[in-house]
Image (tube, rainbow, N blue to C red):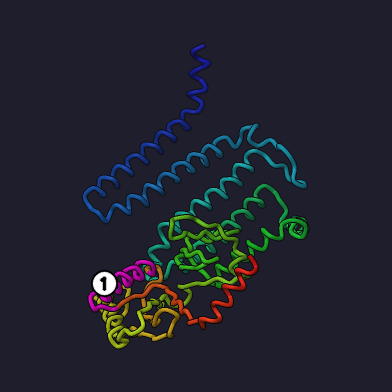
Amino acid sequence: MADSIVNPFMDHLDLIVFIISVLIIRWLILFVTKKWSNYRAKIVRVHMIVKSLINWVTFYGIVIYLLFYFQSSTWMLDGIFNIGQEEVSIFLIILAVLIVSITNRVSALVRDYLFPTVYKKYELDRGVQFTFDKVFHYIVMVLAVIISLSTVGFELSALTVFAGVIGVGIGFGLQNIASNFISGIIILFERPIKVGDRVIVNDIIGDVVRINMRATVIKTLDNEHIIVPNSYFLEEHVINRSYSDKLMRLVMPVGVAYGSDVEKVKHALMQVAADEAEVSKTVLRHPEPFVYFKEFGDSSLNFELFVWISNPQHVIMVRSNLNFRIDAIFREKGIEIPFPQRDLHLRSVDQHVLEGILNNEKGKE
């Protein structure tokens, strides 16, 4: 009985020693890099990179070793089903899955740790970074899938038949999905919107946080997330406040009572813009602010203060600050902001006409 237990253990002793050795080496490397990161802040990022790399190298290394260790076993090499003339075994299936899985992890590692250094060096904006990340990931994953299919004996010429089937499916029920997918690719390359842009969709203001294969995620100012199909941005009217230049003109409408000194109003509004520019990095001095005497309204003289800001994401904050300042300076200078009102004018009526009307009414009674 004891021999039956010990023999399998001794038969796979080299496998057990390999796994234990790999785990010990992993622990030692992570221990050393963590100790270094405790003394030098610059080593923290290196430790995170090494930790991620060591973890997946350890896992996949053990899996690959097990795969080749049992490659001569009958259960590993026996065919499960056939693709054409090729028998597909468990070994080939695991190998194909490993190719796709490892490629996906390598792609994530490159995009998370290698590309950010390049982006920082060349000062690329978030939209360019996102586009490059997506294109790189799609290319390497397509190549990995092609290689994995070839590994299990799948004839690539059969893809033409598969593409025909997909075409029929698109024609009958997948137009919407295909349209959004193609629109997503066009958005990534043409870039009518990009990650980080502030957009207005159906009068809702938000920031583009992610462009997926089928839909784009927009985060509103209320921290809500809107899922918008990609085709919408190519077919509908969308306002992109960050499309080519983040410089934006902010219009502040204000009305004052009739009889107000319009020159005093103008100087007060210009003072508001200057005071806000002193404390805000967003409000610009150039282009210069401008006061526009818009019209003689029903109840007020209507003005608009034009102020240029450098970041459209600060519109709400700047607008609120300017309104506070306008109210304060108008109170200080005695400038009245009127409320809507209506004047009722009564015409005098001839006494004889009035008596005739009253007598007529009494006669009816």
Tell me the quarter of the picture where residue 122 sits. bottom left
Which residue lies under the disc numbered 1? 328
Tell me which residue sits at (47%, 79%) in the image. Answer: 346
Q: Outermost residue toward the left?
A: 39
Residue 165 location (% of width, % of height): 77, 56
Residue 358 location (% of width, % of height): 57, 73
* 192 relative to 223, above or below: below
Q: Which quarter of the figure is the C terminus placed in?
A: bottom right
* 252 relative to 213, above or below: below
Tell me which residue sits at (57%, 34%) in the image. Answer: 70
Question: Magenta span has 270?
Answer: no
Main secondary structure found in the magenta portion = helix
Highlighted magenta segment, given as a residue range? 315-335
Report whether 97 appears left or right of 112. Answer: right
Residue 56 location (% of width, % of height): 45, 45
From the viewer's side, name the closer residue of 308 and 343: 343
* 167 relative to 63, above or below: below
Q: Outermost residue toward the top?
A: 1
Tell me which residue sits at (67%, 47%) in the image. Answer: 152
From the viewer's side, name the closer residue of 289 and 300: 300
Amino acid at circle 1: Ala
Tell me which residue sits at (49%, 68%) in the image. Answer: 199
Report whether 197 appears left or right of 183. Answer: left
Question: Magenta span has 321?
Answer: yes
From the viewer's side, name the closer residue of 145 and 347: 347
Report whether 41 appears left or right of 133. Answer: left
Label 1 packing within 10 angstroms: few (<14), some (14-19), many (20+): few
From the viewer's side, name the closer residue of 267 and 169: 267
Residue 7 location (% of width, % of height): 51, 20
